[in-house]
Amino acid sequence: MLLLATCLIGAQAQLLYKVSGNGLAAPSYVIGTYHVAPASFVDSIPGIQQAMEEIGQVYGELNMEEEMKPENLQKMQAAMMLPEGTTLATILTEDEMSRLNARLREVMGVDMTNPMVAQQLGRLSPITLSTQLTMLSYIKKTPGFNPSDLFDSHFQKVAKQQGKGVGGLESLDLQIKLLYQGQSIERQKELLMCQVDNWDFMEQMTDNVAKAFFAQDLNAIKEAVDMKMGNSCDSTPEEEEAMIDDRNANWIQQMPAIMQAKPTLFAVGAAHLPGEKGVLHLLRAAGYTVEAVK
């Protein structure tokens, strides 16, 4: 069993995969991304330069150029806010606010007893603040982090520079629904307090995902995102299906026509690639040959 496990890990210790066969005139590629990895990590991916030369277009989860349009930025910002007339102070108890403020002081050096901080953060939805806390903590531990030069946006930028096509597998409206409106405010509040009260566990999970990504180890990425506490802080099966499995299945429906039109590099979150319901397995089940690029 140990030998089998070692073989499986070796087979999955890649981020770039070639997709061929099943009637494709030319191969396409799938690469797993990580939203806080620097663009410079591209140089560590075997075969990526050749893949970029071969393909005619890049597809991400979203078309990032569309996302940055002023009207779409406004739509995203509106989705990140609590309903009008509601603030975190009105939905959290005094004790919960005290625990949240203690965590904010640890991460940011200030908290929402400061009126300016309360004005900036107090109207954010709990899920938005939770995401911000994770990002701020990562930035604090990662000197030189540059949010404008990241791995997951690199491929679309290069494609545009080379005059190649860029597309998205999902609409902004769908991502807004998934990320900001998929859970009730009560559930969002519960998950925010889970993060606040179980900081070391959440930090360990984030660290494990980052280490696994930079080791290009899909099995370890899956293991990290599947970490559980054994209580209501864990994602429910329904939440995991909505965030990962259902989206994978939806992408697989679109990918054949996209690949037939032009050889394509699909750059999507690495957590979407491994497992029986992952993109790589689903492509193989659909009749394609999927090979790690070494």
Image: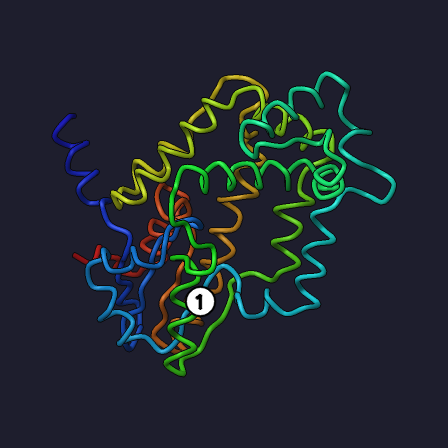
The quadrant of the rendering that contains the C terminus is: bottom left
Residue 214 spot, x, y in % from top left: 29, 45
Q: Which residue sits at x=35%, y=56%?
A: 283
Q: How is the image coloured?
A: rainbow
Residue 9 spot, x, y in % from top left: 21, 38
Residue 75, above or below 235: below
Residue 195, above or below 166: above
Name the residue furthest right. Answer: 85
Residue 100 spot, x, y in % from top left: 65, 25
Left or right of residue 91, residue 38 in this image: left
Left or right of residue 218, residue 86 in this image: right
Name the residue furthest left. Answer: 3
254 or 293: nearer the viewer: 293
- Which residue is the site of mark 1? 59
Q: Which residue sits at x=69%, y=54%?
A: 77
148 or 254: nearer the viewer: 148
Give the quarter of the image for residue 258.
Answer: bottom left
- Secondary structure beneath disc 1? strand
Left or right of residue 30, residue 238 in this image: right
Q: Which residue sits at x=39%, y=75%?
A: 159
The quadrant of the rendering that contains the N terminus is: top left
Name the residue furthest bottom. Answer: 163
Residue 119, above or below 250: above
Query: For the residue carrying disc 1, how many other residues have a C-alpha within 10 Å: few (<14), some (14-19), or many (20+)?
Result: many
204 or 167: nearer the viewer: 204
68 or 239: nearer the viewer: 68
Figure disc tally: 1
Q: Amino acid at mark 1?
A: Tyr
Residue 51, above or below 12: below
Residue 83 spot, x, y in % from top left: 82, 43
